[in-house]
Amino acid sequence: MISGRTLAQGANCESKMSEDFFRAASSCYLSKEDYDCLGLSDGKNILLKNEFGKTVLSPRVDDGLHRGIVFVPMGPWANILIGPDTGGCGTPQFKGVEIDIEATNSPILDIRELFGSIQRAEA
Amino acid sequence: MRVEDAICSFCGCLCDDINVEVEENKVKRVRHACRLGSSKIMGHERIRSPMVRKDGELKEVSYQEAYERAAEILLAASKPLLYGWASTVCEAQKKGILLAEEVGGVLDSTATVCHGPSVIGIEEKGLPGATLGQVKNRADTIVFWGCNPAEAHPRHSLRYSSNACGRFTSEGRSAKKIIVVDVRETRTSKNADMQVIIQPGTDYEVISALRMLVAGKGDVVPEEVGGVAKKELASLAEMLLAAKFGAVFFGLGITHSRGRYKNIDNALSLVADLNSHTKFVIMPMRGHYNVGGIGQVLAWSSGYPMSVDFTRQAPYFNPGETAACDLLAKADTDAALIIAADPASNFPRKIVEELAKMPIIQIDPYENPTTLLADVVIPSAIAGVEAEGTAYRMDGLALRMRKLVNSSYPSDEQILDGILESVRSLRSSMSLRGGLKDDN
């Protein structure tokens, strides 16, 4: 998996609580071959998971991607799958992350649901 | 009212030809800006009032009350993290450094989850750079490596690089060679003469192979490197050597991948090697409009460009230890002031979970996931739209951001002043009572 900027994600990155940001950043782009292979054409969502967590996204075909690579717009949905290690340079590895993917009927969490589960300590 | 040649405050391009129509102190129309800049200048739903969390809920308070609560949090902490700074102006950044020194904290910028590896690589090797004006006027060969300006810096190609017409490049795109190296086909690669698709995480190997080919040592290069045939790499090396003035622009595709700062180190070496044959320059595609500025302001005040620890007798810099993600992952910080950034969205989830365990002060014009975790929320004027100040373009050129509309919100600089004043007054009353931090 690689994560990064898209026009729609960037245009809504200062309105993160909006429906537009949700649509822009909760998607997973993949090749037509991978899309067909996973049987995603009947409106299913896609589940991405690895040792750090799992996230459900809306699948979209991108002809620029080769088999075996998925692209997720940068943001809180993608970052569930990013490990905390910085390799001694301060920067986590946001790209080239190994993940498993499968079709799912689970819903996509909205931004408040995504953060609702985080335990906040009272100051 | 019409404001001509305003500077856009979205990305590191700092486009300075934006026309903005203002009616009744509101931005009505933005011309010349890309979708990203236009969205930024037009604005979004704002945080209405300062807020402090009480009994688990954010409650509206006065600015003064918010400043005082922020000061309490910062002074009670043994090592607060002051993070963000990329989407605000240098004057606010300077004030932030003063605050970090006074409370004894670590100041880090969003560069650490962005071009931090570039900053480290550049410190190791030096940067054969140029201004974007020089690139526009002279470059006949342009390489985009691990970046996609068509989506992240949409006007870069037309104003400065692949499609720009300049003094010695008057024919524009048709007289230039454009090369895109990436792990996927992108909107940027559709405009390329040559597209090289590499396997993820092989930037270092591919750059090393190119260095051998440029040095005339192609015999040591294997038949395939990073999924690319040697023949293809050899024609890429030929294109680079044929340049009269080449420019490499690189993005997070290379800083965020396996190898991180070593990739940048190697790319800088490739450009140094090319300069034995022809003229070549290299530049990181900086994302936030003034992420370059915080690097400059920190460097001239502390000697270091990011992740600076002010808790010791002298500024200390050791990314991997003093960077925001490392501090949080190791629970080596106990409070956070977040300004002009949204780490809750942009840090790895495991690190956000650590951040949520400590008191958070947020300074931002907009509600975002960091607000959901914050204990003090202080809404600010939008720097570069509602407040003026200095910003550094991705090539290091300092430009003056104008105020386009008036705002009832205080600027980041005024807010930091308010917190500083509260810190000083609280500290003096604490010292009168005979207790500071751990002593009370």
Image (cartoon, rainbow, N blue to C red):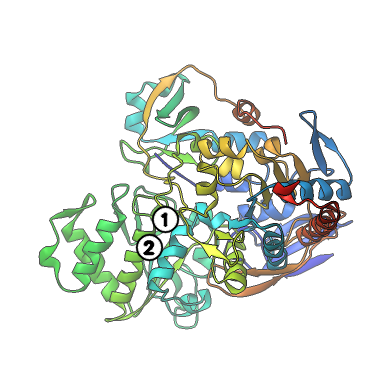
Q: Secondary structure at mark 1?
A: helix
User: Residue furthest toward the top?
Assistant: A105
Query: Tag 2: residue type?
Result: Ile
Q: Position of residue B204 (x, y in %)?
A: 29, 57
> Compared with residue A21, is residue B72 higher up or lower down, i.e. above or below?
below
Q: Is residue B208 visible?
A: yes
Whether residue B247 sits left or right of residue B108 in the image: it is left
Dot 2 falls on which chain? B
- Estimate how packed mark 2 is, as few (under 14), some (14 to 19) or many (20 or more) residues with alpha carbons within 10 Å: many
Quadrant hosting residue B5: bottom right
Q: Which residue has dot 2 on it?
A: B264
Query: Tag 1: residue type?
Result: Thr
Q: Going 53% across and 34% down the picture, which residue do you hit?
A: A77
Q: Position of residue B320 (x, y in %)?
A: 45, 53
Q: Distance of mark 1 from mark 2, alpha carbons? A: 7 Å
Whether residue B9 sits left or right of residue B428 in the image: it is left
Q: Which residue has dot 1 on it?
A: B255
Question: As rendered, which of B249 and A48 lies closer to the eye?
Answer: A48
User: Residue furthest toward the left?
Assistant: B219
Q: Which mark is residue B317?
A: none
Is label 1 in contact with label 2 (beta carbons under 8 Å)?
yes
Q: How many discs appear?
A: 2
> Compared with residue B196, is residue B270 higher up or lower down, i.e. above or below?
below
Q: Secondary structure at mark 2?
A: helix
Q: Going 88% across and 50% down the picture, which residue do you hit?
A: B64
